[in-house]
Image (cartoon, rainbow, N blue to C red):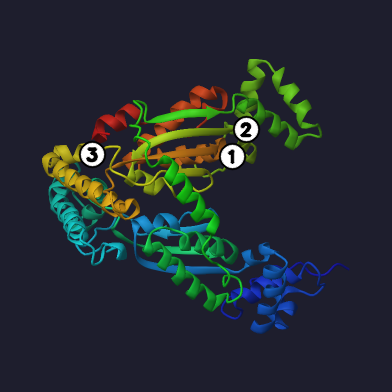
Amino acid sequence: MSPDHKIYLLDPKKLTPETIAVTFAKTSRSPQSFQEIASELTEEKSAEFHEKWVVGYGHASVAEHAVLHFAVENVSRLAVETLESCRLASYTEKSTRYQKWSPTDFHMPQELIGHQLESLYRETIEGLFSSYHESLAPLQRLIQSENPKKMDESADAWERRIRSQYVDVCRFYLPAAALANVGMTINARALEHSISKMLSHPLIEVQKLGMELKRIGQEAVPTLVKYADPNPYLQRIASALSDKTRNLAVEQPLADWCVLVDYDRCAENRILAAALYRYGYIGYAQALRIVDNLSPDERNQMAKIILGDLDKYTIPLRELEYANFIFDVTIDQGAYFELKRHRIMTQTPQQLTTHLGYAIPQGIVKAGLESHFRAAMEKAQQAFLTIERWNPAAAAYVVPNAFNRRVLLQFNLRSGEHLVALRSAPNAHFSLRRLAQRISDQIKAAAPLLGAYLRTNPAETLQQVEREHFAQV
C-alpha cells in the first residue's frame, strides 16, 4: 500500500530560514519526511551544512529555499532602482500615484554633506518639493471640474476616486531624491547577489543600503549572505566603460522615441513550431518544416488556437518566449520607474540625466502651471549640470520625474504581451499607456499574425494618449 499523500507548510515561526533550506536540501539523499529531517536540525547544524555545501561546494540553489521579507523605509527612489534590480524577488513600493510627499521627504547624499555644492543641492530639492506642493491644489481643482462629485458620493470617496488623476500629474515635479518605502521578498541566493551589486555601487547611499541588508539578513541567514562583498568585476567594468564614453557627445533622441531596433524575422514560425513540438512527438526541425508549408488559413487557425481565447487573467503559452524583440526607448523617468518592475526582460537604462529634455503633461498646461513647471525644470537642470561636473552619479538625485531617460529593452513575445495588456489598461499611468500602445503597434507590424492578438486597450490609441495627456514629450 502506498504512503499517504501529504502537503504541508514548514512553519517559519518555528524554523529559521536556514533550517528550512537545509530541510529541503536533505530530501535529495534522505528517505525521511520533511518534518523528520527538520526535527533533527539545529541552527548550528544548519549553518555547518550551508558552510560545507553552499559555500564550500557551490550548491547555491539550496539558498533559494531561505526566504526573507525586508521592510525598507526612507530610501531615495534613485537607490530603489538598484534595490529592485533583482529579477528573482518581489517588491511593493510607496506609490507616487496615491500618496503625497511631504516637503522633507528627500535624501541628503553623504557625498554632498559639507561640500560647497550642498547649498545648491538643498535649494534645488526644496524648490522642487515646494513646486510639487504648489501644483497639488490647482490640479486637484482641474480634475474636480472634469470629474464632478456624484449625487450619492461623499467628499472622501470623491477625493479617493480622483486623487490618482491629479497626483499622477504632480509627480512629474518630484526628484529622484524623493524617499520611498519598499517591501521586498527575496531568497538568500538572490539576496547575496543583490547585496554585492549594492556594495559595488558608486553612491554611498546604495552602499550603505547593501551593508544594512547584509547585517539584517545575517540575523536570519547567518551563513548564506556573510560572503556578500563588493564585486571587483562590476566596479572594473563601470570604470573602464565610463572612461570610454566620457567624451562622446550626448545623442539626442530620435524623432521616433520608441524604435524596434531588432527582432527575430522568423518569430511567428518559431512560436508555431514550438507549440506543435510541445503537443506532438516530432522534432523541432520537422515542426518548422510543417509550419513553413502551412497555408495562410492554416496559420491563422493555429494562431487563433494559441491566442484567440485569452481572457484578462489567462497567461499565454510559454512557447511565445521563442521570439525576441529589442526596443530602444526614450521615456520620462516617472514612466521608467514603473517600467523597471517588468523584470522578466532585459533592461539597460542609461544614467539618469537632464540631457534628453523633459515631458510636460497636458494637465500642467490646462491648470495654468506651464511657466511654473518650466521654471522648476530649468532650475533643476542647471543644478544637475553644475553637480554633474563634479559627480555625475550624485547629480542624478536632483533630476525630476519629467526628464527623459533612454532604456534598451529586450523581451520575448510572452513578456511583451503581458506588458502591453497591463500597461495599456485604463487604470495605468498615461506615460506607460503611451509606451504600451507604441510597443504594441510595432510588434503588430513585425509579427502581424500573432501580434493581432495582443490585448491592447482598444478604446485608446497612441495618438489619443499623446493628444490628451502631453503638451510636450
Give coordinates of residue 310: x percent, y percent.
55, 37
| Circle 1: residue type | Pro
Q: x, y percentage for residue 92?
A: 42, 59
Counting from the top left corner in percent of width and height, residue 309 is at: 57, 34
Q: Position of residue 434 (x, y in %)?
A: 35, 35
Residue found at x 67% / y 69%: 55
Distance of label 2 from label 3 (alpha carbons): 39 Å
Tell me, yes or no, whether the two marked residues, 1 and 2, touch with CB atoms within 8 Å: yes
* Residue at numbered disc 3: 361
Q: Looking at the image, can residue 150 be seen?
A: no
How far apart are the alpha carbons under marks 1 and 2?
8 Å
Question: Regarding mark 1 in the picture, which secondary structure is present there?
Answer: loop
Q: Quadrant of the N terminus?
A: bottom right
- Viewer-nearest residue: 236 or 319: 236
Residue 205: tell me if it is visible: yes
Secondary structure found at label 2: helix
Q: Nearer the viewer, residue 381 or 469?
A: 381
- The answer to which image quadrant residue 328 occupies is top left
Q: Above or below — where is 368 with respect to 42?
A: above
Q: Earlier in the sequence, mark 2 or mark 3?
A: 2
152 sits to left or right of 326:
left
Question: Residue reaching furthest top?
Answer: 295
| Side (left or right) of 142 relative to 472 | left
Dot 2 corresponds to which residue? 306
Q: In the rendered structure, find residue 316 and report the number of the disc placed on it.
A: 1
